[in-house]
Image: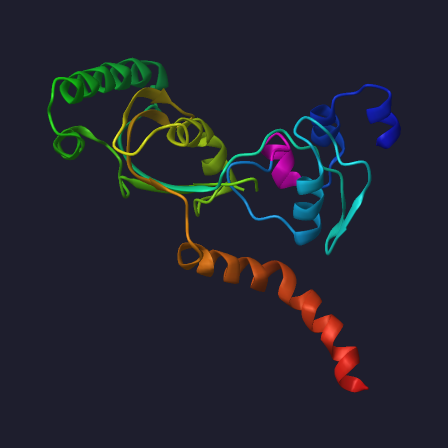
Amino acid sequence: MFRRLRSGESFEQIALDSSDDRQFQAMAAACGSPCMLFPEMEAAAYETAPGQMYPGAIRVPSGFVLIKVYDRAQRRRVRASHIFFPTQGPDSAALLISARARADSALRLVRSGRPFEEVARAMSQDQTSGLQEATSAASTRGRSASRRQRQALTEFEDVMMTMKEGEVSGIVQTGVGYHIIKVVESKVPEFADEKETIRTFYKQQLLAEDRAGVRPQCAR
């Protein structure tokens, strides 16, 4: 892979056609806003300038990785509600037109001064919670959803992460429908906010390795 990269091939294309990480392949090989990194990857990322590739293979518990750093941004936790109109159904062409018309109507009401929450209760067709959460970081996206759902909502999160607290978006189209987003909270998270996320990541990814390292010392 290093030979291909040195010859000028795109890092992104090589990641898509050669990486053994199927999840990152499905997400265009991007581990971005937001996700947890192995410590070895995180250390390498901090040593690498934006736009550059780390100059070696990085050993992690599951194998070896090559990384490229695109940019750096301050980690933020963002909570948002949305007004949603689905575009998936038996007659998707007609549904797309009607969903867009309803989204336009809802946005006009919000911009005319009608409270966002009132319009959401009256018009949103979200069958689950209207509250979406994610955390922007230099590391996968924070929502508990299937890979297919995460892919479909990438556009939602991309817009949400650029908005200020209290701001309302225009109409955002994703793979599942049209959304009007309102950011309820946007802040730099404190340790208390992240503690359970860190604990879960440690148990899933690092605990077994740490136990394996401690056992030989205990046997002495």
Question: Which quadrant is home to the C terminus?
Answer: bottom right
Let me know if residue 24 is in the magenta part: yes
Horizontal and vertical percent for residue 153?
43, 32
Quarter-of-image position of residue 87: top left
Q: Which residues are magenta?
A: 22-30
Q: Residue furthest bottom?
A: 220
Q: Residue furthest right?
A: 3
- In this rendering, position of residue 154 left or right of residue 44: left
Horizontal and vertical percent for residue 168?
26, 26
- In this view, the residue in front, 29 or 74, is 74
- In this rendering, position of residue 121 left or right of residue 50: left
> Residue at (43%, 44%) from the top-left corner?
143
Q: Is residue 183 above or below residue 192?
A: above
User: How many numbered marks does the figure carry?
Assistant: 0
> Residue at (29%, 13%) from the top-left corner?
97
- In this rendering, position of residue 43 left or right of residue 80: right
Q: Is residue 34 above or below residue 181?
A: below
Horizontal and vertical percent for residue 82?
27, 32
Question: Which quadrant is home to the N terminus?
Answer: top right
Let me know if residue 202 is in the magenta part: no
- In this rendering, position of residue 217 left or right of residue 45: right
